[in-house]
Amino acid sequence: MMNPKIAAAAQQPAPGTRIELFELDLNPVGVAAVFYFVPQTNTGGSGPLSFGGQLYTPMPIEADGFKITGQGQLPRPTLSVANVVPALQTYVRNYQDLLGAVLTRRRTYRQYLDDGSDPDPDAQMPPDVFEVRRKTHQDKQAITFELAAHMDVTGKRLPGRQIIRDVCTHTYRLWDAGAFDYSRATCPYTGTDYFTADGNIAAAAADDACGRKLSDCKLRYPGNQPLPTRAFPGVARVRAS
């Protein structure tokens, strides 16, 4: 349902400057990170924008193809992100091109931002939620992704997730403010034995991290306990001839 303020503003001859805000959630691919960014063209050269208490960092990005045409086919937008965030490049390289990461696009008007004339975090159009379907291009300047709506199952194949032999795709617990946060975790481990990502005993709970290998799972579930890994260690490697 359209927010009343947004609906009323959209009917005005000069509704205000429209702002697009993007959230790229990497938790579905096993990374406890969310990137919040806004196209530099939306900021007028200023710094980060704040909406609902969340800061969105200006970045050189291009997002296109969100328009719904009414022809029966859901849009397949593209998102191009400049290579200015080293961490994002690393995640793309190490986590299967971020396939399955969730992108949320929020649209509002400048006056409803936290420093606007009428700040209101609820004054936004219904958010668009997409997932990264594939990486279509990458060079030294930018990375381009094709997106698909969550409800868009055209072209889906079984199995519903990639079969990865050596890497578990569970989301591991996150240490935050003196305690473990399980709100996004899919890994069932809640034990008090702590290990680093390279398989050594961790000095403190805050250093606990999973390297996502079968050996990391065995450290947390010793003996003959069932391993909750999402990897497929029994899959043979296949090389095309």
Image (tube, grey):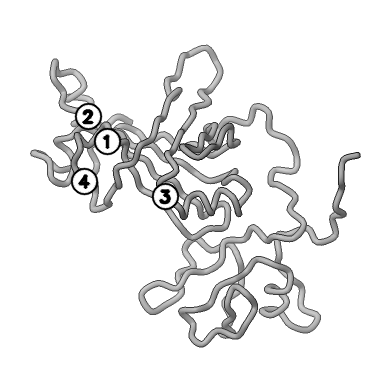
* Residue 220 position in % (x across, y down): 66, 79
Q: Residue at x 17, y 38 (%)?
A: 112
Q: Is residue 42 above or below residue 208?
A: above
Which residue is situated farthest in the top direction here?
71
Side of 205 relative to 60 (left or right): right
- Counting residues from the start of the chain, the first of labels 4 and 2 encountered is 2
Q: Crowding at label 1, few (<14), some or many (≥20) Cα neighbours within 10 Å?
A: many
* Residue 32 position in % (x across, y down): 49, 60
Secondary structure under the numbered disc 3 in the rendered image = loop
Secondary structure under the numbered disc 4 in the rendered image = loop
Q: From the image, tell me which residue sits under label 3.
A: 85
Q: Amino acid at mark 2?
A: Ile
Q: From the image, tell me which residue sits under label 4.
A: 47
If the image is split into quadrants, where does the C terminus sit?
top right
Q: Are marks 3 and 4 in contact (CB under 8 Å)?
A: no
Which residue is situated farthest in the front direction here?
140
Q: Nearer the viewer, residue 183 or 27?
A: 27
- Counting residues from the start of the chain, the first of labels 3 and 4 encountered is 4
- The numbered disc on residue 6 is 2
3D distance between C-alphas at marks 1 and 2? 6 Å
Of tags 4 and 1, which is closer to the observer?
A: 4
Q: From the image, tell me which residue sits under label 1.
A: 124
3D distance between C-alphas at marks 1 and 3? 27 Å
Q: Amino acid at mark 4?
A: Gly
Q: Crowding at label 4, few (<14), some or many (≥20) Cα neighbours within 10 Å?
A: few
Of tags 1 and 3, which is closer to the observer?
A: 3
Residue 198 in which image quadrant: bottom right
